[in-house]
Amino acid sequence: MNKLFHYFLCPSSRFTRIILNEKKVDYDLFIEDFSDPSEHYLFKNPAGFFPVLSNSFNENIVGSLVIVEYLQNLVLPPKLMIKKNENEIRRLLFWFETNFKNEVIIPLLKEKVFKRFEKNSMPDSHIIRTARANLKYHMQYFNYIIKDNDFFIDDKLSYVDLFYGASLTVLDYINELNF
């Protein structure tokens, strides 16, 4: 049985759960502490980031982008990597995984969620304002991309759509979306 080690507010983890469900892959969920992963988890992934998929052969596939490639190689339907746009889809997935997550989501999670549970810790309003400014910039960029690409928010569902949706659900949960 596949095992997914994740954190429920991590957009990469949400994205991976969506993909596994779309491709009808059976798996069990194991929640890890985002700010303090267990020793068992760090043995699987010394870098400590999320998610990790342990397959039925007890191989650890680390990171959502590597999990995407692993599932692509299994050739499970539905096809979410559109052949003619593969490079652009991979580029945008990398953008979500690195820039968007690290410049917007992680700082907001740390300041608005995690600091509530730390002793003698207060949210830093400067970090929150910076992340919100970054969010505005990224949303403008996404709107620009959406206008010109049929694989992003259009008839053809792709991995980019799913990562975008997973990211928006985290932002919505912490009340950072203003539609």
Image (cartoon, helix red, strand yellow):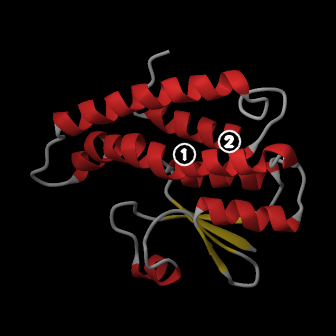
Q: Position of residue 33 (x, y in %)?
A: 40, 63
The residue identified by callout 2 is 160
Q: What amino acid type is highlighted by mark number 2? A: Val
- Residue 42, quarter of picture: bottom left
The residue identified by callout 1 is 96
Q: What amino acid type is highlighted by mark number 1? A: Phe
Report the label total.
2
Q: Secondary structure at mark 2?
A: helix
Q: Earlier in the sequence, mark 2 or mark 1?
A: 1
Write the residue at 41% across / 42% down.
Answer: 105
| Residue placed most toward the observer, 143 or 114 | 143
Mark 1 burial class by Cα count in 10 Å: few <14, some 14-19, many 20+: many
Question: Is 26 located above or below residue 144 in the figure?
Answer: below
Question: Is 36 located above or below residue 136 in the figure?
Answer: below
Residue 175 can be seen in this image:
no
**Relative to residue 162, is residue 170 drawn left or right?**
left
Write the residue at 51% across / 62% down.
Answer: 50
**Relative to residue 157, is residue 120 drawn left or right?**
left
Q: Position of residue 168 (x, y in %)?
A: 54, 33
Q: Secondary structure at mark 1?
A: helix
Q: Position of residue 136 (x, y in %)?
A: 41, 25
Write the residue at 83% across / 54% down.
Answer: 23
Say whether marks 2 and 1 touch (CB < 8 Å). yes
